[in-house]
Image: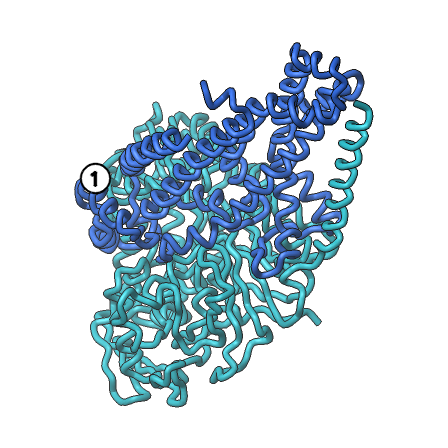
């Protein structure tokens, strides 16, 4: 019997040795070389057809398509497929001058009729961003290199949209093809082509540089996006050099990577987090119709402590919904509402709600972690407001938007440098103002802002922002600090208005 | 044996149908606003309604199911609502990843469990106690903790293996081995702990049998007794557990695939289920059920082949 066990032991030893040998072959990753760039992302594009494009997935599209207008890292615009753009005096006609020397891969020329075809398809295509072209009445093809956008009313965000999803130009020859091939095989004029052989849609997208690209070539021959559903894997990938660049949103992942001497990090304040109050008319929660009640909610919470404890101090306390790069932004509004439960109680009393009221909000746990849920409950309870959370899966958002069951919700919202983008989402009746509430001041100011460039409406934008804060349309907590991380081989320039930078913002580190 | 296989296969087909109906109904119960998820929180409501209508979600559930079934029977599983990929194609690109893990873990745990189990069962004494303690510890350690420690030590600190990603076997066999080694190792810990205890117990039981004593008395070499007689008779319980481990591994694979960023079925199941992507989930469910039925059948056949007594019962 002894013989057998010795044999068994020898086998075990062999197995261990084999494992050790294979281990030696394991080092090295896909990212490493300076010719290729691997970017990790937690955004999953719905398809690669521009009609389905959304701002958060822009880098996937930028690789294969060009936009009409290029948005620089600081939010300013520069020529891309359109070399010039000009508004008429009442800002309802936008004339675009187009490049005449650009062709799609199959030889189809890029011209004004391609612009018309793309934009009409985008507006009618049923994608999430289709409404951004709602103000476009018709698109006129003046000649091959001139397209004129006729607007129903002035829209100061139009150039922003043309530098975003609505401005992506695909090959019109593919529009009517059976099975919508653009969904998985993009065809544009962009700097890269999708390498279908190396790509596994849903997990890994590999783009190779288009040698015949008309514009300035980007420094990488190969560009890879990898999708992850958790930041742990991204952090591990960065530490081992398999991922070259990523943006980390959670405080824990940021703290984990910061200590690593090999990685380069850069902060960007992007989303703000807060309660978006929808029900300012008091349809569900009558108390919310009173500005004093909404102000009381703002005074009830201790933002500084929340930021320190929940976000490990990563961010800036704020009371306004406009971002730091917008014209409407005013620093002093960040501290308009102090933490003052006594004042909050007094305001409730004056509004006729001395005994408080009940407030029911939906809770999407990805946005509202336990710590945030219980602190808000505690703060509100201290002034007599009974906050209950309705736990819901991210999939049950129907009850928020369609059934209008709630008077508000906690959201993380990206902050654009363009004031009108924020106004369109938060102030105009629609997306996040679906009860359509408004007031005289807002109605007076909006037309004055929409008809001119933002810098010419600075006074009105300031007035609007201050009004929204004073009337407490929202209960913002803080701007969250995101961390751009590279494995040291890349320099990353953060992009205004986007969490994941544009593909033009990466370069090999010196 | 043939009629046994046929009977089991027929039962499997019925099971497959029942599960497909149940899954479809269960997936349709949650208040999923697929259109809203597709278009995002910032989309206008009329676009969302139009998208839902386009996907046929405004029809009765049974009509939707009938439609799905008639296509599926013709081998058309449709396209994903969320990424537009062909469902069949995307499953066949991800299946090798998860199968690599499952087969790898099964092989590793079969070999190691046999080694440890037989060693402990035959030698007893301190070695036995050592293997038992290892078994308890291995089984008790939470899977995610084992996985995280393995990644941090062998990938991040030592740099022996990649921390994330998967390289296909056809692309590069050595690359494949380097990417699956750590995931397989982390999944194997609990599997080896469980199965080796089964092997040990079964070996001890059989060694105590009268016929083993008789064989020894007749002077048969110990090796022959062990391999020809003892292991054959001791095979059933460990094989059953191994089969169960294989089936249950999909749960473990979810976690491991997420931590290692592997593009497998496990992580895919979670992603698409939370989104309510019915075409994708239904196909995953069908593939999984077929796999479970096949494994159970295989285990039964294997036990019957190894041990004729089981065939009779």
Number of marks in the rendered image: 1
Residue A16 position by quadrant: top right
The reply, left or right, for residue B152 in relation to residue B57 is: right
Q: Position of residue A262 (x, y in %)?
A: 73, 57
Query: Circle 1 sits on which residue?
Result: B61
Q: Position of residue A450 (x, y in %)?
A: 31, 67
Q: Position of residue B137 (x, y in %)?
A: 68, 24
Query: Is residue A219 or residue A361 the one in the foreground?
Result: A219
Q: Residue furthest front?
A: B218
Q: How is the image coloured?
A: by chain
Quadrant occupied by the C terminus of chain A:
bottom right
Compared to B124, does B32 lie above or below?
Answer: below
Compared to A139, does A123 lie above or below?
Answer: above
Q: Secondary structure at mark 1?
A: helix
Image point (60%, 33%), residue name: B143
Quadrant occupied by the N terminus of chain A:
top right
- Chain letter for the blue part: B
Compared to A330, does B300 lie above or below?
Answer: above
Q: Residues within 10 Å of mark 1 (few under 14, many from 20)?
A: some
The reply, left or right, for residue B286 in relation to residue A302 is: left
Image point (36%, 39%), residue name: A294
What is the drawing colour of chain A? cyan
Query: Is residue A127 or residue A109 the one in the foreground?
Result: A109
Query: Is residue A216 or residue B200 the one in the foreground?
Result: B200
Whether residue A406 is visible here, answered yes or no, is no
Image point (76%, 31%), residue name: A8
Image point (44%, 81%), residue name: A79
Residue A29 position by quadrant: bottom right
Q: Position of residue B200 (x, y in %)?
A: 67, 21
Whether residue A395 is visible here, answered yes or no, is yes
The reply, left or right, for residue A480 in relation to residue A92 is: right
């Amino acid at each position: 019997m002894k013989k057998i066990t010795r044999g068994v032991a020898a086998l075990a030893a062999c197995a261990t040795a084999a494992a050790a040998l294979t281990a030696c072959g394991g080092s090295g990753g896909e990212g490493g070389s300076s010719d290729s760039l691997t970017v990790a992302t937690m955004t999953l594009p719905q398809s690669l057809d521009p009609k389905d494009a959304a701002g958060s997935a822009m880098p996937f599209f930028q690789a294969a398509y060009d936009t009409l207008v290029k948005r620089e890292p600081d939010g300013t615009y520069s020529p891309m497929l359109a070399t010039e753009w000009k508004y008429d005096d009442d800002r309802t006609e936008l004339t675009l001058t187009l490049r005449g020397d650009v062709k799609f891969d199959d030889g189809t020329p890029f011209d004004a009729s391609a612009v018309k075809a793309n934009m009409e398809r985008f507006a009618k295509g049923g994608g999430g961003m289709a409404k951004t072209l709602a103000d476009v009445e018709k698109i006129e093809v003046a000649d091959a290199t001139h397209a004129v956008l006729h607007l129903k009313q002035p829209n100061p965000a139009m150039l922003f949209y043309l530098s975003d999803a609505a401005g992506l130009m695909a090959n019109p020859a593919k529009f009517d093809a059976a099975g919508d091939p653009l969904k998985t095989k993009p065809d544009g004029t962009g700097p890269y082509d999708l390498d279908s052989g190396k790509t596994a849609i849903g997990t890994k997208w590999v783009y190779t540089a288009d040698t015949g690209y008309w514009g300035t070539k980007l420094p990488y021959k190969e560009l890879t996006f990898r999708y992850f559903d958790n930041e742990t894997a991204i952090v591990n990938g960065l530490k081992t050099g398999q991922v070259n660049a990523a943006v980390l949103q959670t405080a824990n992942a940021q703290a984990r990577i910061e200590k690593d001497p090999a990685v380069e990090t850069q902060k960007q304040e992007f989303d703000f987090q807060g309660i978006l109050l929808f029900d300012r008319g008091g349809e569900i929660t009558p108390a919310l119709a009173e500005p004093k009640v909404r102000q009381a909610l703002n005074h009830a919470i201790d933002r500084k402590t929340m930021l320190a404890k929940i976000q490990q101090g990563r961010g800036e306390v704020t009371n306004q919904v406009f971002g730091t790069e917008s014209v409407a932004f005013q620093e002093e509004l960040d501290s308009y509402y102090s933490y003052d439960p006594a004042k909050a109680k007094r305001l409730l009393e004056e509004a006729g709600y001395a005994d408080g009221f009940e407030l029911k909000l939906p809770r999407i746990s990805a946005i509202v972690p336990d710590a945030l849920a219980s602190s808000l409950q505690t703060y509100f309870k201290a002034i007599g407001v009974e906050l209950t959370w309705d736990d819901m899966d991210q999939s049950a958002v129907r009850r928020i938007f369609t059934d209008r069951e709630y008077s508000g919700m906690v959201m993380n919202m990206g902050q654009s440098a363009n004031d009108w983008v924020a106004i369109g989402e938060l102030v105009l009746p629609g997306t996040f103002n679906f009860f359509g509430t408004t007031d005289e001041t807002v109605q007076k100011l909006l037309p004055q802002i929409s008809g001119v460039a933002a810098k010419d409406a600075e006074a009105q934008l300031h007035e609007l922002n201050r009004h929204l804060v004073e009337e407490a349309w929202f209960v913002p907590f803080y701007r969250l600090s995101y961390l751009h991380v590279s494995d040291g081989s890349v320099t990353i320039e953060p992009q205004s208005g986007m969490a994941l930078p544009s593909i033009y913002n990466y370069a090999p580190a010196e | 044996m043939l009629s046994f296989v046929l009977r089991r296969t027929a039962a499997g087909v019925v099971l497959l149908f029942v599960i497909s109906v149940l899954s479809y109904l269960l997936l349709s119960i949650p208040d999923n606003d697929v259109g809203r998820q597709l278009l995002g929180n910032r989309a206008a409501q009329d676009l969302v309604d139009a998208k839902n209508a386009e996907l046929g979600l405004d029809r009765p559930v049974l009509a939707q199911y009938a439609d799905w079934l008639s296509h599926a029977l013709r081998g058309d599983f449709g396209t994903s609502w969320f990424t537009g990929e062909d469902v069949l194609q995307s499953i066949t690109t991800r299946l090798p990843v998860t199968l690599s893990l499952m087969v790898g873990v099964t092989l590793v745990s079969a070999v190691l469990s046999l080694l440890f189990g037989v060693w402990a069962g035959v030698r007893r004494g301190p070695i036995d106690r050592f293997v038992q303690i290892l078994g308890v510890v291995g089984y008790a350690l939470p899977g995610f903790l084992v996985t995280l420690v393995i990644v941090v030590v062998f990938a991040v600190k030592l740099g022996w293996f990649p921390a994330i990603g998967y390289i296909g076997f056809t692309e590069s066999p050595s690359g494949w081995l380097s990417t699956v080694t750590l995931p397989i190792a982390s999944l194997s810990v609990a599997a080896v702990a469980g199965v080796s205890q089964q092997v040990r117990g079964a070996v001890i039981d059989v060694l105590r049998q009268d016929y083993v004593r008789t064989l020894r008395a007749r002077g048969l070499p110990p090796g022959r007794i062990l391999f020809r007689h003892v292991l054959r008779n001791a095979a059933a319980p460990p094989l059953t557990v191994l089969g169960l481990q294989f089936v249950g591994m999909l749960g473990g694979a979810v976690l491991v695939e997420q931590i290692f960023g592997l593009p497998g079925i496990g992580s895919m199941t979670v992603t698409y289920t939370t989104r309510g992507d019915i075409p994708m989930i239904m196909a995953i469910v069908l593939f999984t059920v077929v796999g479970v039925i096949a494994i159970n059948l295989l285990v039964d056949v294997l036990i019957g082949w190894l041990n004729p007594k089981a065939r009779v019962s």
